[in-house]
Image: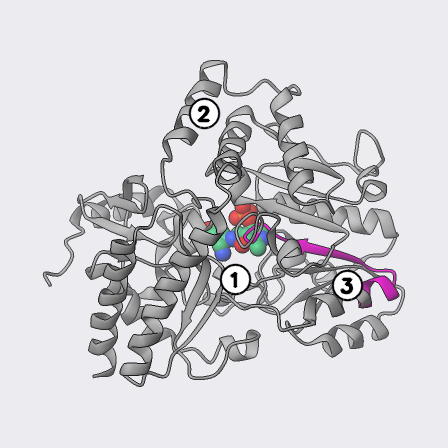
Amino acid sequence: MSPLTTRNSDSLFEKAKAVIPGGVNSPVRAYKSVGRNPLFIKKAAGSRIWDADGNSYIDYVGSWGPMILGHAHPRVIEAVQRAAADGTSYGAPTELEIRMAETISTLMPSIQMVRMVNSGTEATMSAVRLARAFTGKEKIIKFEGCYHGHADSFLIKAGSGALTFGVPDSPGVPADVASGTLTATFNNLSSVQALLTEHQGSVAAVIVEPVVGNMGCIPPEPGFLHGLRSLCTKENVLLIFDEVMTGFRVAPGGAQELYRVSPDLTTLGKVIGGGLPVGAYGGRRDIMEMVAPQGPMYQAGTLSGNPLAMAAGLETLSVIREDPDFYTRLEAKAARLSGGLQKVIDTLWLPLKQNRVGSMFTLFFTKQPVKDYGTAVTADREKFGVFFRGMLDRGITLAPSQFEAGFMSIAHSDEDIDRTIEAARGALEKIYR
Ligand code: KE4
């Protein structure tokens, strides 16, 4: 296998670093935790991406979740082109936004009203403000290692990029904001109960990734989400499901359908924008009616409900909904990959653990079952970096961090998957043999 030549990406990275902090517009893209320069991508189609040196890769990043149909799906591209021909933004309401809101509400009945925003961070930041406005209480509970975007209230033992950098609290977050965020342990209901007891009457909401993606993929243990639901109901605390990643990914109605738990508020992003900038928050009508201009809680956005993002998201959801077997087929693809990887792990007696929920998955470099932050951080990041680079050399792009999830798309073929399994066998033999 000839080593990858990435001369163009390397020189683009040097140029980028002169004018963009770290050379990237989102930290995890810099490949800092996997020990090499990042690839600069030229184009993508289906399951493939091509870098600036013309190398092609089978891609499991999928833009961190939006590309559930695969890259550049013809119907999505056509929908965006058609929308763009009528203008790119009006700063005024459109029928498309009603269709998006009705579609979300149909697929996620707990969402009786919804507000479109432009990113997952905007969605979670607004949902927390709304929870505080509705309850009149100020504290929130999040889970160690979970990531809800980069708003001040969340960069407290954040997962995702911050976890990779090993900086649990980001500089620049005011102490009094940090003190308003309490941190529990994922899959540990008594840690939540303890905080609710200790801070009786001052917690507005619990926010959770119902399936964690940002410590790597970590499923909820049986009863955990139901337990959160009853704790929140009992203590008069709002339950916020951050489904930015899991929404329309792990089931037609997201994790709340998969696990049959109804949150009070839900945040969304990624898939509903088909790759264009998008976010949304929604939930119980009595809560959402507090949002301006209907109610007093202020939140706004120049490009919220942008027609191109709505067109791309609606077309993505239409393609999914027209195929009654979509999620069954997607599950079969992801199961083929994890089954093949498990065979490699078992044959080579490797100290590795796989977590998977539907089409999101992570291979952890630890022999411990990974069920929370404490077990996730036992993973060997060094070995993960070697594996990541080995897979890149074999034409496979994985999420460039041990603490991220990979994503299967409906465009990945059996050949792609079998090639990925063989590449993993080669890369792992090099590490452990
Ligand atoms: P954005 O602001 O990046 O659109 O969404 C923030 C967010 C909120 N909630 C969850 C559950 C998320 O996974 C995210 C963003 N996910 C990361 C991937 N772990 C985005 C990748 C990046 O930061 O570049």
Residue 119 drawn at (x, y percent): 57, 42
Residue 376, placed above or below residue 38: below
The residue beneath circle 2 is: 79
What's the magenta region? 231-246
Query: Which disc number belongs to residue 214?
Result: 1
Going by the numbered disc 2, the residue's amino acid type is Ala
Quickly name the residue at label 3.
229
| Structural crowding at the residue carrying mark 2, measured as other residues with C-alpha within 10 Å and reported as few (<14), some (14–19) or many (≥20) | many
Residue 208 location, x and y as percent? 66, 61
Left or right of residue 28: residue 113: right
State yes or no: Cβ of the residue under disc 1 lies below 8 Å from any atom of ligand 1: yes
Q: Is residue 132 above or below residue 219?
A: above
Tell which circle, 3 or 2, labels the residue nearer the N-terminal end. Answer: 2
Judge whether residue 232 is colored magenta.
Answer: yes
Quick check: 264 left or right of 185? right
Q: Is residue 203 above or below residue 101?
A: below
Mark 3 residue type:
Arg
